[in-house]
Image: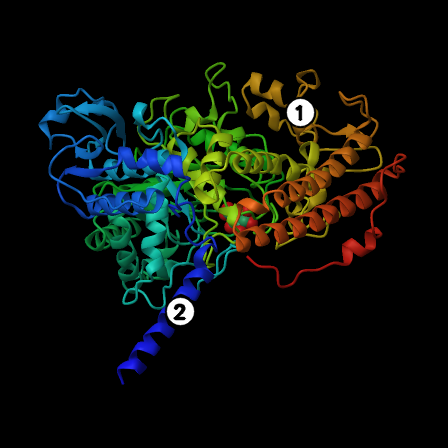
Amino acid sequence: MKSIVWISRCLCLLLLSAVTQLHAEDGHELWLRYAALPKTQAAQVATHAIDYVFKAAETPTTQRARNELALGVAGLAGKKLPGSEQIHDGSIVLAVAGKYAPLDQQALPLQNIGNEGFVLRAITLEGHAVIVVAANTDIGLLYGVFELLRKFQLDNALAKLDIVSNPKISLRLLNHWDNLDRKVERGYAGQSLWDWWRLPQYLDARYEQYARANASIGINGTVLNNVNSNARILTPAYLEKVAAIARIMRPWGIKVYLSARFSAPQEIGGLKTSDPLDANVQKWWNSKADEIYQLIPDFGGFLVKANSEGQPGPNDFGRTHADGANMLAAALKAHGGVVMWRAFVYSDVNPEDRHKQAWSEFKPLDGKFADNVIVQVKNGAIDFQPREPFHPLFGAMPNTPLMMEFQITKEYLGFATHLVYLGAQYEEVLKADTYAKGAGSLVAKVIDGSLEQHKLSGIAGVANIGSDRDWSGSDFNQANWYAFGRLAWDPLASSAQIARDWLTQTFSSDPTFVETATQLMLRSREAVVDYMTPLGLAHIMGTGHHYGPAPWVSDQKRPEWNPVYYHRADQQGIGFDRTDTGSAALSQYAAAAAQHFADPQANNEQYLLWFRHVSWQYKMHSGRTLWEELLQHYDHGVAEVAAMGQQWQTLEPYVDAERFLKAKEFLQIQLNEAQWWRDACVAYFMSISKLPLPKGVQAPAYNLEYYQALSFPSAPG
Ligand code: BDP
């Protein structure tokens, strides 16, 4: 009997270890693997992490900070951190201000770091060489621990550690476009993480893992449901489920928010109207807010998509966006909640250039929003294209706090399979100069509130997270989630450095690996621009699913849903004239920004066809004609993807087999599809320009009709 038990135990263990191995490197651990460091680095960490001394009140958050520290040091340096009362050389001192007098005498700059910041410093304390992690709050301490663990992996100068850090932006949020049936709009990583059906009784372990991953990069809020929202999320049964998620998020410093459907008073409240000036409607929202805060005392607030793409909104009742936003803001005000009101609006009955419509609608409302409203603006005026000039509303509404909306999920950038590092795109937008108050009025300064001294500031990323084991549909997509969080914390950080950090934490700290893979990631952004939409082209993708090239589409009901609306190619030339001879969208920018975008002398051809309509024979700075240049960019994009594939191939010795192979195969898909984009666009533009291909330029693999006939009825997202 005994031996049977013994044998079955061994079998179980074997099975378990096989399973562990199977899942060992499938991307599930994200950048929090804490894999063993190389010997010398591990030894360094071990000397700086003999034990830890805890000088803070015990809270669910500090518990998590301590666990994380122990977990990290165990993984990285193979060392158990015992935790002790006494300080020694090599102690890590975790302290919250006011809890440990000797540390308070050290004059750490705690008064400058607010509620979420931290100080990490190697100092001598009570005669011992220690590293302190100090903060004003337990959440600051948790962030400090994550940063310390990052430094253990990245830094060789631990004895000189000296970091004072606090987030520049106060609301750092993910936006989930997740529906209640678990479909994710524009999601390519499986189903929604939120298992509404089984909530609140069943709490998937992934909720906590999700919260931990977000906390590790400083994200402090999450909007759980789609902006194309279902009013049911506001019913009591669903609010219970939301409250259950909020309880898991709370210790990690993450607040929960909801997308609110503007017509909810009619749809679930039994009212005849949702007019924001109607007293009964106001009463309904007030009591809805009270009900929510009863369940979720730290509820963050509402995100609203109104009067956009068929969603209900205040315009339906003859009211403005400010009327709508302020009504919701009033309901949340007493509870400390905010309204994030989206500026992504355009209308099919408005003949004005789509680029101009949000500005025209929102600029006149500047200063008319309540003080707990923040207007959420997409990075560009059209829609998350591979490259867009920054949205003209940035810098144009000085009296209203504006927050940034980036897309992390790659709706227009090859979905989950293409390797496109978006950190580079985010950085380009954040560091763009609006010139609103002269040179240096960067978009980053608009959204961190510093340009106009706004207290409320925010940034949101449309999440790429789903139920896939690797969370984001590919390992490299995790980098976009990570980069978003890091840039939300510090919008002027370098995306190249962030890529290095991510690679080190996610794959390997080997310098050859990190340098090569960083180059690969950095070139990926320009590659996608080149093989999809070079020289300022935009929105020439397939209808509905938004995958693959379809510059020929011209049969959609709304003019601005047709790619031909955007490229305006004819036999003479190509591009959207947004100068004064065209739609004059350029005039929505400060003069110096406009000059940067569209002055031929400014030598900025990245945006040429976005702002100008030019002849196919237009002379580019290279000396080539526009036609030749366009072809050159398409070919370059494809060649870049081929080169990325080759670069990845050289990295095989540094990466575990499972993740190596997945990235390799995805890069092959990307190469095939880059070629498809190039060939289809070249075939189409040839048919319009009637120009031959210059010598040496390869003809598309198939004729135009072939590409036009492709269809994708079951595309994901
Ligand atoms: C577009 C997406 C659509 C979203 C919309 C939005 O195609 O699915 O609902 O943006 O942001 O890019 O509201």
Q: Are marks 1 and 2 in contact (CB under 8 Å)?
A: no
Q: Position of residue 317 (x, y in %)?
A: 42, 48
- Please, what is the three-letter code of the amino acid marked with disc 2? Leu
Most distant residue in the front direction: 3
Q: Nearer the viewer, residue 165 or 708?
A: 165
**Residue tagged 1:** 579
Quarter of the figure with the C terminus: bottom right
Q: Which mark is residue 358?
A: none
Which residue occupies 49% across, 34% down?
A: 500
Q: Is mark 1 within 8 Å of ligand 1?
A: no
Residue 150 visible in this rendered orientation of the protein: yes
Image: 318 above or below 5: above
The earlier-in-sequence mark between 1 and 2 is 2
Residue 162 visible in this rendered orientation of the protein: no
Most distant residue in the bottom direction: 1
Displayed quadrant of residue 81: top left
- Please, what is the three-letter code of the amino acid marked with disc 1? Thr
Q: Secondary structure at mark 1?
A: loop
